[in-house]
Image: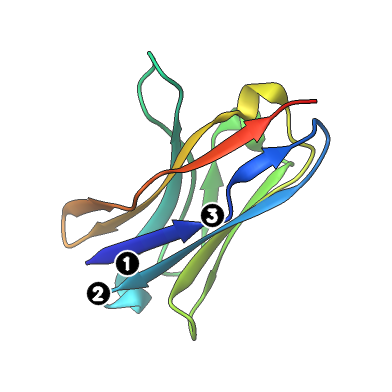
């Protein structure tokens, strides 16, 4: 299983950014996909997850601002981030929970700063 994330960078507060994560080596249709983030010194936290049925869940701090979605044809999961805040600055990781195991992509840095 491989997860390749992209789309991070620097954005001003209030701005938007979209992260992408292409999955390979798994049955995309039955996998649970998600985005996590980590700030140095803190534990990795879940940001959003989307089930194989397309049901999405979000951590409270991003509800109404972030949207997770999946493209079945491209085996890709997205995280659309709007109204970004400096506290959203973190290393973002793509994750899949597949047959009881967790797989991680390489992190992509998101920095929200003026």
Residue designated by label 1: 31
| Residue 57 picture location, percent across and down | 52, 47
User: Mark 3 or 2 closer to N-term?
Assistant: 2
Alpha-carbon neighbours of circle 2 within 10 Å: few (<14), some, or many (≥20)?
some
User: Mark 1 or 3 closer to N-term?
Assistant: 1
How far apart are the alpha carbons under marks 1 and 3?
13 Å
How far apart are the alpha carbons under marks 1 and 2?
8 Å
Residue designated by label 2: 26
Which element carries disc 3, helix, strand or loop? strand
Determine the image quadrant of residue 1.
Answer: bottom left
| Residue 104 picture location, percent across and down | 29, 50
**Apparent side of residue 75 relative to residue 15 in the rendered image (left or right):** left
| Residue 36 picture location, percent across and down | 43, 40
Which element carries disc 1, helix, strand or loop? loop
How far apart are the alpha carbons under marks 3 and 2?
20 Å
**Apparent side of residue 55 relative to residue 99 in the rendered image (left or right):** right
What residue lies at 39% left-to-right and 16% top-to-bottom?
42
Answer whether labels 1 and 3 touch (C-beta < 8 Å): no
Determine the image quadrant of residue 83.
Answer: top right
Answer whether labels 1 and 2 touch (C-beta < 8 Å): yes
Q: Nearer the viewer, residue 31 or 80?
A: 80
């Amino acid at each position: 299983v491989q997860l390749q994330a992209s789309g991070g960078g620097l954005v001003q507060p209030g701005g938007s950014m979209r992260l992408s994560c292409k999955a390979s080596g798994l049955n995309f249709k039955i996998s649970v996909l998600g985005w996590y983030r980590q700030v140095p010194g803190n534990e990795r936290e879940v940001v959003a997850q989307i089930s194989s049925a397309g049901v999405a869940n979000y951590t409270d701090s991003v509800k109404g601002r972030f949207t997770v979605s999946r493209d079945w044809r491209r085996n890709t999961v997205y995280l659309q981030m709007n109204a970004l805040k400096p506290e959203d600055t973190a290393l973002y990781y793509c994750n899949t929970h597949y047959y009881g195991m967790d797989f991680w992509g390489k992190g992509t840095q998101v920095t929200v700063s003026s």
